[in-house]
Image: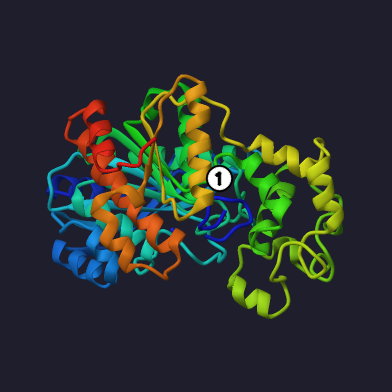
Amino acid sequence: MTTRPRSFTARSAGLPALAALALCLAFVAPPADAAARGDCLSMTTVIARTPSQIDAMVATFGTEAQLYPAATCGATQYNMTYQTIAPDGRAAVASAGVIVPTGCAAPFPLVEYNHGTWPMINMTMTDPVMHTPQTVMAQFGATGYAAVMPDYLGYGASTLGYHPYLNADSNAAVTMDAVRAVRACLASGGTLNSKLFLTGTSEGGYVTLATQRAMEASGLPEFKIAAAVATSGPYALADTMMSMLQVGDGVPGYAQMQLTGYQKTYGDVYAATTDVFQNPYATEPGFDTLLPSVTSMARLTRSGQLPSVLEGNNGLLTAAFVNRYLTNPLEPARLRSQQNDLLNFAPKRPLSLCYGSADPHAMANAQQAATFFATQGVAVATSDIQAVPSYKTFIAQMAGKDYHSNVEAPACVAWARQYVFDPLRTGAGRKQSARAAARHALGNR
């Protein structure tokens, strides 16, 4: 997914710790054939910022800056590569950005952060001028959290050749191995404590919930989650896909990335691209590897490599495919969407779902997920940022901006830290965290 909660839709240390990092960065990585899942292969410094430099960075965010507290720690950003697995189970290398606080006393809790959909292959969570890693540094690193930010397969150091888009098991495996790897590389010197928080937005909200499901299913004590906050994800993927195709509402580039990704992972979505996609797009050279791309979707559309609409005479998807999807329960693409739906487990650890009610698709997914989990005997908090009093000025000032990416996403990141993670980090416990969240999200259900 992109920056919206629906498929195909558009809607982002103290001195002891530094000594430990120096030792870690000097280590010799094992040979590739000897590496195991979660091995930290390398970690290199990208940039270090003081508290005043972080505050100056946040000031450039404009209206969004009001969502951030003044920095109490500096932070260093690293580029980590690590061992994981591809969707077919083969060994694979992935990359992640890592944030470690400086000038504050370790050990630090760890935030695993999942980004939204990227159409461009050269985007990475190790980029110090990209807004998403800057957000993580300012919200978490500057307030005493370490963070690991996977790029996902298909980006950064990955050579997979495609992104397993909305593939729950694959993306969960990559994030679990990122947690293992950052703990391995920061093992010396007491940099990290045992607390683990999960969060992410849009596609990253989906990945966050998929990761919670996988971590809890593993039964491994290394993955005891303190709390998770998922934002704006397509958790009810099967219903979301059906609804989207019924009304023909979607962004062609994300449809291409999802369906070709499922084909490359499972091999049964189509025998030929023309089984799903219309000409002239389906028979263009390189169409099945078009996204993610070094070229923006806007340019791909202007150049005629992608259409501007999903369905219809000039759309991406054939009418025959749409009809099969909507009417045939055994249509392979439909089965794969059902396979990657996340409403099929009962969360064991504290989970909150954040959204903005001005994004109806995000709201519908959050409320549908909460309703399902309630049938499993699990109470899941849902928070509407529109109902948080302290965000009203920000939301009003951001009128006219892309709501999903520029309003909902940063507000939910701030809400996750302040009202869910912070009370648990200080030892207040789950009940106080829940009370704090409810007190500042009057629209909770």
Residue depicted at 84% across the width and 57% down the height: 319
The residue wearing badge 1 is 234
Judged left or right of residue 97, residue 31 is right
Tell me where residue 206 appears, x and y as whole percent: 51, 44
Residue 83 in view of the camera: no
Mark 1 lies on a secondary structure that is loop
Judged left or right of residue 159, residue 327 is right
Q: In front: 98, or 274? A: 274
Residue depicted at 29% across the width and 65% down the height: 64
Judged left or right of residue 289, residue 154 is left
Tell me where residue 218 appears, x and y as whole percent: 49, 24
Q: In front: 108, or 205? A: 205
Say few, some or many: other residues with alpha carbon within 10 Å of mark 1 (under 14 / 14 to 19 / 20 or more).
Answer: many
Specify the quadrant of the image occupied by residue 33. top right
Tell me where residue 313 appears, x and y as whole percent: 83, 68
Residue 215 in view of the camera: yes
Q: Quadrant of the C terminus?
A: top left
What type is the residue that disc 1 sits on? Pro
Image vertical order of residue 211 relative to residue 277, above or below: above
Q: In front: 208, or 154? A: 208
Tell me where residue 347 appears, x and y as whole percent: 45, 26
Residue depicted at 52% across the width and 39% down the height: 172
